[in-house]
Structure formats: C-alpha cells, structure tokens
Image: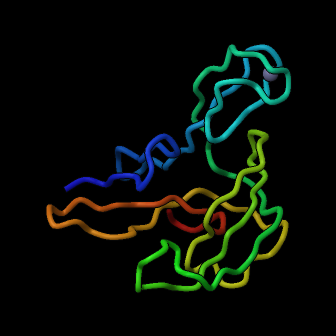
Amino acid sequence: MARVPFEAGLVVLPEGERDLPKLLGNRCGECGAVFHPPRPVCLSCHGRSLRDAQLSGDGTLYACTHVQMPLRPGRRESRDYWVGHVDLDEGPRVQGLLSADIGEPRIGMRVALGLETLRVEDGGDEIVAHHFRPAGESA
Ligand SMILES: [Zn+2]
C-alpha cells in the first residue's frame, strides 16, 4: 500500500512520519526566479539554466474562490471546495486547492502544504492530492 500523487511532477510525498510534503519546482541559475510547477525556460530572463528545487509550500493566501462544481468532471461525488492563489515564501504565486476543513479562508492567512486522499484503489494504494491548509495544523 503506497500513496501516489494524482498528477506526477507536482509534489514530493513525505517518506517518514515526521517528513512534510514538498512542492516540486525549479530555480533559475541566472536570475534566481523560482517556479512551480517546474518550467523549461525562465519567465523572468528567458534563461535555460533552471535547476530542480523542492519548495516548502509555506505561504500566504493571496486570493481564493469557493467552487460548487465537481472537482473532476463526470464524477458523481462532489463537495464544495476552495481554490486559492498562494504567495509561497520562496517567491512564486501558485494556484491550488485549499483543504476541505479550512472553513472560511481569509486573505493574508498563513498556509502550509498538506495532503488529502482522493480515493483508495483496489490494491490499497491511496491516490492523494496536495492542498493548502491553515499553517500550524497537522498535514
Ligand atoms: Zn531567470
């Protein structure tokens, strides 16, 4: 039984109980700009010397919206959810899900990266998605 990201190339799953998930990104070797998801060319200087970087996922909520459509088209189960734009401490502004138990998110609140199980497959593997949760709560 393993945890498997729903989409490859976005997140590094924790290996140990005390480890935290990380966002996959990259950093420009010429101007220092940071990106998530990783990009082949720097959007700031058009340089191509980008190196892989793992980002903490800690940041500040810049904007959010409440969505009342199914998360995945064609699926019957649905729940309301929030999507937010987060200014990561490492620099980039990224979009992502907010945790289901976030309540009423507040612009400017501190958030941290967390994981949620979308489904458990027949073999027992958990398909997980990353989200942003209020900072200070367990992942
Ligand atoms: Zn650059």
Q: Residue at x 60, y 79 (%)?
A: 81
Residue placed most toward the observer, 34 or 106:
34
Q: Residue at x 70, y 80 (%)?
A: 66
The image quarter in which residue 99 lies: bottom right
Q: Residue furthest front?
A: 74
- Residue 20 locus on image (x, y percent): 49, 49
Q: Residue at x 57, y 44 (%)?
A: 23
The image quarter in which residue 135 lies: bottom right
- Residue 26 locus on image (x, y percent): 64, 29
Q: Residue at x 79, y 40 (%)?
A: 91
Check the picture and name the quadrant holding the N terminus.
bottom left
Is residue 39 shown above or below 86? Answer: above
Is residue 82 shown above or below 48? Answer: below
Quadrant containing ligand 1: top right
Is residue 4 shown above or below 107? Answer: above
How is the protein colored in the picture? rainbow
The image quarter in which residue 74 lies: bottom left
- Residue 116 locus on image (x, y percent): 44, 67
- Residue 48 locus on image (x, y percent): 70, 15
